């Protein structure tokens, strides 16, 4: 039986490379309450070193992954527009792989459900 998991990575499209050492935090939202589940930083490949949630830890429901883009861009001496970038998404199949990538530039960003 497949084991569900949640992963992420960030690409700095201005530099054309992974966004290294970018802080993120994952929240679960239930009954209007936002609960922090984990936090971390991207590695040299712009990825979380391990799944943010996996197996029994991945439950159906609403989640929010917040990326600290402002702090990252400040460290690069960039003048960016965004501070924290929240991405809110729903998990429906706990056996699936949910991959939430972020493509980041100083004045824009995009995301999608990856694989």
Image (tube, rainbow, N blue to C red):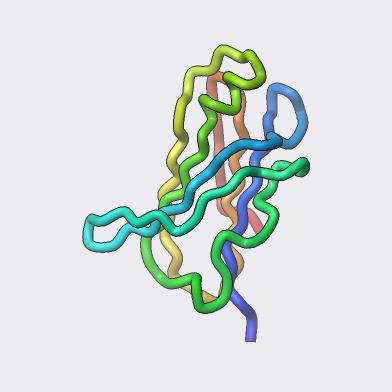
Residue pictured at 66% horizontal, 37% vertical: 21
Q: Residue furthest bottom?
A: 1
| Above-or-below relation of 38 to 80 | below
Q: Which residue occupies the foreground of this view, 97 or 51?
A: 51
Q: How many marks?
A: 0
Residue 14 horizontal side relative to residue 37, left or right: right
- Report which quarter residue 108 is drawn in: top right
Residue 9 horizontal side relative to residue 66, left or right: right
Residue pictured at 63% horizontal, 21% vertical: 75
Residue 59: x, y in percent? 44, 72
Residue 39: x, y in percent? 52, 50
- Which quadrant does the N terminus fall into? bottom right
Residue pictured at 45% horizontal, 32% vertical: 84
| Above-or-below relation of 97 to 45 | below
Q: Which residue occupies the foreground of this view, 113 or 68?
A: 68
Residue 38: x, y in percent? 49, 55
- Report which quarter residue 80 is drawn in: top right
Q: Which residue occupies the foreground of this view, 103 or 5?
A: 5
Residue 5: x, y in percent? 59, 68
Q: Residue furthest left?
A: 31
- Which quadrant does the C terminus fall into? bottom right
Residue 19 horizontal side relative to residue 66, left or right: right
Residue pictured at 72% horizontal, 44% vertical: 43
């Amino acid at each position: 039986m497949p084991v569900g998991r949640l992963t992420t990575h960030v690409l700095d499209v201005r530099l054309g490379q992974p966004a290294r050492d970018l802080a993120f935090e994952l929240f679960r939202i239930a009954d209007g309450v936002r609960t922090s589940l984990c936090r971390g930083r991207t590695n040299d490949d712009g990825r979380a070193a391990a799944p943010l949630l996996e197996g029994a830890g991945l439950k159906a429901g609403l989640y929010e992954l917040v990326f600290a883009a402002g702090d990252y861009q400040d460290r690069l001496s960039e003048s960016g527009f965004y501070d924290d970038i929240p991405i809110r998404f729903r998990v429906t199949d706990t056996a699936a792989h949910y991959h939430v990538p972020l493509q980041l530039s100083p004045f824009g960003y995009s995301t999608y459900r990856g694989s």
